[in-house]
């Protein structure tokens, strides 16, 4: 089968499409014939080795973190799933590999494709959907009636995070570009700020939570609008000691992440707030709950108009890195 692999970590985007055997499945795994795989910024982190302290892969390894497909084979201890089922998944962190014609995936990481989505649109759900769900329910422990602000929330994360946050009973505020305003409001946002017309830190105050999608340069502004004891959850600014403890990483990594994240922790403390970081994991049961929200609200993720095949994987990754996608970028398998 064809698979997109890297031989070593590198700052250069040099993914190789190779022929490797179809994977053998374990007792609790299913063999998925991949229909569509999404290309995320996480791919760049996997290529460069930026997350190797969280997960270091044995090289060579196949890239790709989320997929849709059809089950071709099931292990002897698999329950609930059978051959022919349409499924999707954020693959287990320790065993990614969506950029291939087939993938062996543990049953605990998959769920049935939402009935309102096809293989292409379904690929826009698992990673961002689970990031939003885990961030809101586990890290922030958000309660109905509380408020969350998502700066830069007009992209692929926001289109999933907004309806999930609304389904959990939150007041949702988003900033982003003017073109996405109607779409994000339709998804359930209570308030939308055009970032070119309004500075959110001059408009908002006393917010319970902020989910950062913009990075370290925006942290000061994000912290300034939180109420006392509020929480800032970042998707990209970097881990801290609390993250390492929750991930049950060894003591030396806890020390390392503690040192790396101390500046962010101190910034938060000055604002009587708390800084948190998330690295989303696979979870089929949570994906089931996300699926229910997707189906109930008829959420259809925006997919970028560019068509890519596995042979064009480098172009697709570079497009995610340097382009301006108008939705989730995907690789389609015939």
Image (cartoon, helix red, strand yellow):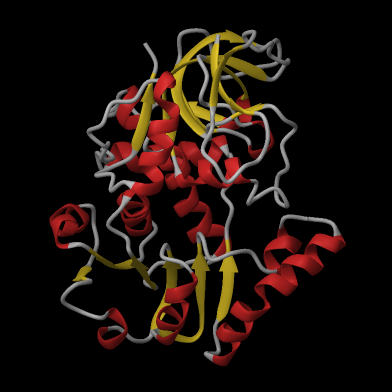
Q: Position of residue 146 (x, y in %)?
A: 39, 73
Locate residue 319: give its quadrant: top left
Choose between 290 and 43: the one closer to the eye.
Answer: 43
Q: Residue at x 84, y 57 (%)?
A: 250
Locate residue 247: give its quadrant: bottom right
Examine the rendering and report whether any part of residue 81 can be seen.
no
197 to 243, vertically: above or below: below
The C terminus appears in which quarter of the rendering? Answer: top left
Q: Residue at x 55, y 23 (%)?
A: 16
Q: Position of residue 280 (x, y in %)?
A: 56, 49
Q: Residue at x 46, y 67 (%)?
A: 215
Q: Residue furthest right?
A: 251
The N terminus appears in which quarter of the rendering? Answer: top right
84 to 61, vertically: above or below: above
Q: Position of residue 41 (x, y in %)?
A: 46, 46
72 to 207, vertically: above or below: above
212 to 8, vertically: above or below: below
Q: Residue at x 70, y 68 (%)?
A: 242
Q: Is residue 204 left or right of residue 282?
A: left
Q: Is residue 248 left or right of residue 220?
A: right
Examine the rendering and report whether any part of residue 156 can be seen.
yes
Q: Is residue 137 left or right of residue 153?
A: right
Q: Is residue 187 left or right of residue 20?
A: left
Q: Position of residue 208 (x, y in %)?
A: 43, 77
Mark count: 0
């Amino acid at each position: 089968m064809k698979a997109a692999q890297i031989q070593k970590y590198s700052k250069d985007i040099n993914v190789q499409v190779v022929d490797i055997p179809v994977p053998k499945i374990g007792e609790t795994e299913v063999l998925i014939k991949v229909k569509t795989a999404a290309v995320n910024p996480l791919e760049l982190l996997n290529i460069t080795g930026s997350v190797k302290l969280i997960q270091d892969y044995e090289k060579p390894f196949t890239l790709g973190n989320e997929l849709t497909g059809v089950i071709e084979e099931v292990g002897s201890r698999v329950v609930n799933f059978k051959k022919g089922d349409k499924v999707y998944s954020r693959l287990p962190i320790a065993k990614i590999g969506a950029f291939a014609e087939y993938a062996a995936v543990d049953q605990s990481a998959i769920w049935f494709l939402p009935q309102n989505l096809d293989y292409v649109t379904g690929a826009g759900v698992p990673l961002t959907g689970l990031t939003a769900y885990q961030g809101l329910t586990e890290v922030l422990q958000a309660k109905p009636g509380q408020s969350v602000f998502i700066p830069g929330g007009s992209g692929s994360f926001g289109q999933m995070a907004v309806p999930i946050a609304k389904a959990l009973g939150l007041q949702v505020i988003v900033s982003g570009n003017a073109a996405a305003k109607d779409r994000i409001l339709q998804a359930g946002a209570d308030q939308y700020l055009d970032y070119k017309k309004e500075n959110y830190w001059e408009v908002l105050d006393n917010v319970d939570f902020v989910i950062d999608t913009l990075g370290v340069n925006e942290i000061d502004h994000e912290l300034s609008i939180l109420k006392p004891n509020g929480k800032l959850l970042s998707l990209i600014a970097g881990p801290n000691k609390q993250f390492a403890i929750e991930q049950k990483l060894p003591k030396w990594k806890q020390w390392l992440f503690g040192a790396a994240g101390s500046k962010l922790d101190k910034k938060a403390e000055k604002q009587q707030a708390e800084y948190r970081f998330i690295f989303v994991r696979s979870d089929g049961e949570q994906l089931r709950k996300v699926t229910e929200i997707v189906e109930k609200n008829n959420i259809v993720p925006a997919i970028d108009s560019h068509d890519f095949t596995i042979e064009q994987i480098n172009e697709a990754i570079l497009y995610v890195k340097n382009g301006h996608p108008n939705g989730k970028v995907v690789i389609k398998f015939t």
